[in-house]
């Protein structure tokens, strides 16, 4: 039987198309929680279970290697103890409560690293449809799950199997706090660094240190550190940070993104998740929000000029201008490949419907718990176009300037919500600069 040449070519095209898309579609999803995942957060636990195959099918492996081991925990007999085994049992029970077919702790921590090479554990991992990485110290996750006897980026057999289940067989990978931050991948410049320590103000003042080796005893409060080898390689879209609004990490994320030449930074609030599908499309799930900063058009200033282009003074302190800030809330979506933001259908713009004429926030501790996000929300719930807040630390003191851009900036709210504490904010411009002598030139608005 003769087959028309064009029909034959079309059939080959369909086979190739199906094969390529089938392979792509087998990659799993990420559920990245910003820490402090509450046991009653049915929305997020159910999301993880559904992505792992659904109730009565999902088989969840719990990895708590970021926690201290039981033998180091002086309070291990306390019912509220927080060691690797206690945390593993806690999460396993919670996943069972919400309908997983099975959930069990994978017994790997800093005192049992060899289990990451154990053949029986590897076989068990192959039967699982989802994995949850608990919080603690992300450097411990690297220490336990990478085989540094070969290289800084060589996964142990257990981690390699988990990544295979995710990349080839559609398993979901979820994490909270350190378990989220460890998921960073790579971009065109190589591995995206894993943030390991630091505070916002100190990041402005002190240089960033690279720490490839884990040092459990190093707690220098002035250091902002990253691991240049990155994490597990699952999130290729930018830096990851957690406990974000609650610990005032906006300055840290912006500073690191710019200094490390990474366009996007994603800061996830506590008890809230960023869900990422196999194609990189993202959706916010939970009661708070996810900050997305974009430093593509940000710039630094070395000299300040007057209106006649005469040099007024030279800046010696770190500064950054024209950062794009977005704060997305439940149901909002982001496409990193295009930068497109899609607002959830249940929200509408509050432009022209603001609660007050003037922004009323005037704080001197912008990086205190939840203050930065509150100041931004307050600005957008007013008719003011700009607000400036300051840092508590004064060596030197920094200003944070937030600006609405006419025709670009907007804020959205679910009209059924009574609280004004949750707003989606799009395209706010953000500047960080030391106040002396800058404030005298730019002034408050």
Image (tube, helix red, strand yellow):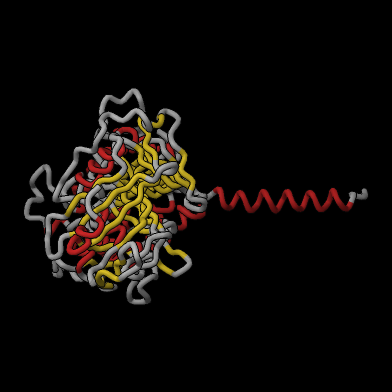
Q: Residue at x 32, y 52 (%)?
A: 430
Residue 276 image position (x, y, % from top left): 44, 47
Quick one: 227 or 46, which is closer to the camera?
Answer: 227
Q: Position of residue 403 (x, y in %)?
A: 32, 47
Question: In the image as oriented, which residue stretches furthest toward the right?
Answer: 2
Residue 203 image-quadrant placement: bottom left
Of 67 and 292, which appears nearest the observer?
292
Q: Which residue is most to the bottom?
A: 150
Relative vertical location of residue 361 with respect to residue 267 in this rendering, above or below: above
Q: Residue at x 25, y 56 (%)?
A: 442
- Left or right, 130 with respect to 384, comes to right
Q: Residue at x 12, y 43 (%)?
A: 80
Q: Residue at x 89, y 49 (%)?
A: 3
Instruction: Find residue 100 and report its horizontal and vertical position in percent.
Output: 36, 37
Give 292 or 39, whichever is nearer the viewer. 292
- Up the image or down, 125 lies above or below 139; here it is above
Q: Is residue 116 visible?
A: no
How many marks can you see? 0
Q: Position of residue 43 (x, y in %)?
A: 34, 33
In this view of the protein, which residue sits in the foreground, 312 or 237?
312
* Vertical order, 443 against 345 (above or below): below
Q: Residue furthest front?
A: 308
Residue 196 shows up from this direction: yes
Q: Is residue 361 left or right of residue 17?
A: left
């Amino acid at each position: 039987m003769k087959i028309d040449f064009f029909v034959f070519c079309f059939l080959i095209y369909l086979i190739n198309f199906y094969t390529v898309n089938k392979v792509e579609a087998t990659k799993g999803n990420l559920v990245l929680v910003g820490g402090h995942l509450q046991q009653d957060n049915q929305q997020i636990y159910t999301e993880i279970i559904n992505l792992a195959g659904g109730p009565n099918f999902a088989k969840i492996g719990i990895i708590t290697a970021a926690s201290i081991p039981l033998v180091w925990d002086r309070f291990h007999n306390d019912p509220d103890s927080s060691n690797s085994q206690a945390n593993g049992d806690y999460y396993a029970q919670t996943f069972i409560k919400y309908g997983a077919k099975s959930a069990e702790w994978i017994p790997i921590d800093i005192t049992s690293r060899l289990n990451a090479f154990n053949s029986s554990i590897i076989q068990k991992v192959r039967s699982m449809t989802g994995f949850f990485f608990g919080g603690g110290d992300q450097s411990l996750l690297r220490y336990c799950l990478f085989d540094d006897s070969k290289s800084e980026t060589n996964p142990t057999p257990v981690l390699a199997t988990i990544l295979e289940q995710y990349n080839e067989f559609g398993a979901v990978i979820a994490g909270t706090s350190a378990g989220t931050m460890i998921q960073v991948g790579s971009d065109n410049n190589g591995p995206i660094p894993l943030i390991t320590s630091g505070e916002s103000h100190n990041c402005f003042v002190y240089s960033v240190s690279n720490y490839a080796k884990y040092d459990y005893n190093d707690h220098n409060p002035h250091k902002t550190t990253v691991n240049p080898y990155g994490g597990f390689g699952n999130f290729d879209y930018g830096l990851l940070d957690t406990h974000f609004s609650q610990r005032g990490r906006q300055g840290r994320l912006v500073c690191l993104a710019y200094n490390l030449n990474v366009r996007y930074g994603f800061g996830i609030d506590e008890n809230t998740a960023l869900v990422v599908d196999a194609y990189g499309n993202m959706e916010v799930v939970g009661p708070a929000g996810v900050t997305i900063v974009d430093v593509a058009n940000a710039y630094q200033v070395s000299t300040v000029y007057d209106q006649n282009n005469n040099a007024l003074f030279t800046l010696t302190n770190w500064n950054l201008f024209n950062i794009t800030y977005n704060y997305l809330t439940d149901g909002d979506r982001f496409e990193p490949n295009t930068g497109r933001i899609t607002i959830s259908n249940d929200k509408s713009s509050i432009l022209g419907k603001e609660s007050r004429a003037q922004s009323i926030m005037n704080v001197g501790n912008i990086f205190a718990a939840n203050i930065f996000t509150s100041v931004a929300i307050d600005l957008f719930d007013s008719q003011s176009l700009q607000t400036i807040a300051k840092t508590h630390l004064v060596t030197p003191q920094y200003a944070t300037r937030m600006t609405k851009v006419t025709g670009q900036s907007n804020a959205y709210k679910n009209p059924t919500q009574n609280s004004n504490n949750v707003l989606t904010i799009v395209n706010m411009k953000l500047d960080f600069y030391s106040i002396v002598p800058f404030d005298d030139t730019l002034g408050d608005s």
